[in-house]
Amino acid sequence: MNKPKVGFYNLSGCSGCLLTILNCENQLLDVFNGAEVVSFLMAQSNNVEKELDIAFIDGSVTTDEQEEFLHELRPRTKKVVCLGSCSCYGGVQAMENEKGTWLKRFNKVYGKKPFKVVKPFESKPVDAFIPVDYYLPGCPIDADQFLYNYARLLRGLPADVPKTPVCLECKWHENECLLLKDKLCLGPVTSAGCKAKCPSHNLPCIGCFGPADESNLTSEFSLLKEKGYTFPEIERKLRLFGGVKFIKQFKSLWKKAQK
Amino acid sequence: MKVLKLKKHNLNDYLDSLRVWGEVYGPVKQGEKYIYGQLDDLSKLDTKMLRTILPVKKFLMPPKFNTFTFDENKYKAELENIPNRIVFGVHPCEIHGLLILDKFFLERFPDPFYGERRRKTAILGLSCVPDDKCFAKSTNTHYVESGFDLAFNDLDNYYLVWVGSSLGDDLVRIRLDLFEEDIKEKDLKHYMEWRNWRDSQYKLNVNLTAMPDIMELNYSSPVWDELGDKCLSCGACSMVCPTCPCYNMSDQIRPSQFTGKRERTWDSCMFKQFALVAGGHNFREARSQRVRLWYTHKLKAFITEFGKAACIGCGRCIDTCPVDINVKTVVKALKGGK
Amino acid sequence: MANNVYLPEPMRIVRRYDLIDDVRFFQVRPLEMERALQLNYLPGQFMMVSLAGVGEAPFSISSTPSRPGLLEFGIRKVGIITEELFKLKENEVIGVRGPFGNGFPIDKFEKKDLIIVVGGLGAVPLRSLLLYTLDNRDRFGRIFFLYGARRPAEMLFRREFMELKSREDLHSMLTVDKDDTGRWTEQVGLVTALFKNLKDIDPQNTYATVCGPPVMYKFVIDEIIKLGIPKHQILMTLERRMHCGVGKCGHCVIGSIYTCMDGPVFSYWDVMHMKDLI
């Protein structure tokens, strides 16, 4: 049987998700034996661009060149899988999105000289440009969740990314609840899969796996408000990884609460 | 039942000696809470603990474990590498929780994965003093007569040790020299005094007697909608509840060959996908329906099924839910209190 | 461990063909003939079908224990597991464990008249009951079989049921909502319209069994109630998410009952009495 052809690509981001895969040293042979890896710039030379079964994309879209690449890629791959919060949600670099301040911030960093090589724009997730089949979120992705889904995808099964909240895995690790300790923890509204890494180190969840299946934002919001957090504080935390998805809902809740 | 005495200063020596039989676990402090942790170092043992974050069910049906490994269509049950374990410090209410799980897992269609772990886990009970979240006296689970191998009753400078099983007797015999067998009248007096004092220490009373009827009458109550609006559906209540048995299954395969494992993980009926069937129909779409199921199952259904409620009054839900949905508040709300 | 209830038993697919567009018939049997002949179950029970690497799901048994040696299923392609099942060919091996569930109370049916009402995919479990009662014909009273499908092309086991029409000891009525072929020789109309053909029903001595899509139940049960059949003599089989089949995983729980152990066959009284059942 012909092995499925896969490609791993990297747009704007730290490449930490691809690195997470390469860090699976014990399973690395499995990863490369289970498929024909035709393109993986970070891992091998002699990459070829051809028809694919699955394309894995790490990083968000920030230039016209990347946008063109996505349009070129989509027709020649059967499935597109987003790896990590950048490609799924826009990533940390999308935290100020929709505020209308992008150009100002861009100029502040890069000066006003025109960019010649590529045309940059505000960071966006991959699905803002092309249809995406599956999302493996996280900053970075969880190695076990990747390996589990990689094996499924190679066998033609759909990805299986349970969107139960972080609290589930957090309790498995017997962590003290940080919300009960009045910390601004996003565990209940954030999708698990991370093995509750942050709360297990006594750090509140910052939402890097994106929204859980059923985020009760209203209740989380009133709880945080009760604990004395202000809207800007909550918003900053949510924006960090959740991108703009949560914000609108929170804003209306905040307005309602002000009345 | 055989009853012995063990001087308190001999406890650590005794627990240390049990390593010949298996790994020794007991309550250790984690942050401001407690967990059942492995006692490599007995100085970590904290006998004054209140409830642990996860109950002792974590040893008998771990949050995540493999049930089978498979190779093509050949399945092999993973029952061989389960170690012998001794869990010290299990409070009476929690042993009642185990008795409920035993009925659940071992009576109709015995579950070998639970059964094998149960057989290899020695339960060493320990008497406790309630805090303001304990209501085991209301649930009548503050004393226990079976379900343990040994039970230690703290009486100032010594323990009364109840031998509850043949394995318990074997465990005593490992260091019989540390125990005294002559129970005197003053020990009995001492024990009765302690019992009366401890009974007086319960501050929280949650009366569950009429719950089946009350649940039935409240089936369409707006209380469920209010609770549903508030519930974060984080599932923490199910994780920490000593009698929540629900689980999920998933097959894990290797990318390059057809071998894998069938994994079992804790699940909660508070999650949206819990009653979702292939084709997309969800039998409990609304959060309020799910909260209602959780409490109906604990406080009504179990009584129909096993003759008693599946609440042991340990207070873990009170200690865990970030939005204060727990047996105490729900029962109060259903009875019309605020 | 002598008997692990979770251990799938390898069974070979001996036949498979499409019943209708998205529903496929699977006939399977244990690898050893001796074991195959030991298979025992009741109409209305179900098996957990297991595909290594994919998972497990419950499926109603469509065959009858009165014809030993094999198990039959009618499976609709609706999720991940069924999608993978449809890729399998004859002679391939799957895992099967069971039987689970209560099944129909066959003993109570003895000497009684039986009305079997089927809509769409409900033919899968009720075929088991129908064939069982026909194979043990003298144990039961009159048997009425009422099957409604949307179109002729959506009627499961169509040829088999057509052939059964020639039996004189079975009152079989087949209907379609709409005949789009022009060649349909049976009734046209809803399954509820067939009730007018039921004559001389002695309600106390009649059991009715119903299985079909959720929309059907209310109307069919109204008809059965009109016949005067007591609520506890009206039986139906229900569907829930299941991972174990043995009342452990909790997914099929409704109040104090586990659909997998206490069901999937429930009486109409159960359904009225236990909220949330349908």
Image: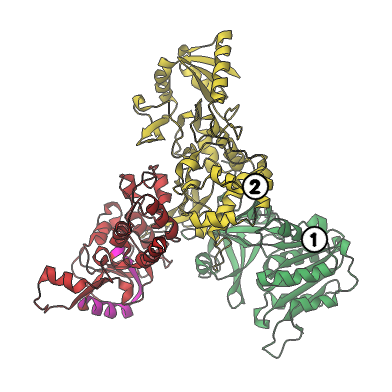
Q: Secondary structure at mark 1?
A: helix
What colour has chain A? Answer: red
Q: Secondary structure at mark 2?
A: helix
Residue C65 spot, x, y in % from top left? 72, 59
Residue type, mark 2 in image: Ala
Cα distance, mark 1 to mark 2? Answer: 23 Å
What colour has chain C? Answer: green
- Quadrant of the rendered image containing residue B143: top right
| Marked residue chain, label 2 | B
Q: Is residue C237 left or right of residue A237?
A: right
What colour has chain B? Answer: yellow
Residue at position x 59%, y 41% from top? B310
The relative height of residue A218 versus residue B15 in the rendered view (above or below) is below
Would residue A32 be visible to someone looking at this image? Answer: no
- Quadrant of the rendered image containing residue B279: bottom right
Q: Which residues are magenta?
A: A65-85
The residue beneath circle 2 is B301
Q: Toward the viewer: B230 or C278?
A: B230
Q: Is residue A259 left or right of residue B296?
A: left
Residue at position x 27%, y 80% from top? A72
Residue B267 spot, x, y in % from top left? 49, 51
Q: Toward the viewer: C193 or B106?
A: C193
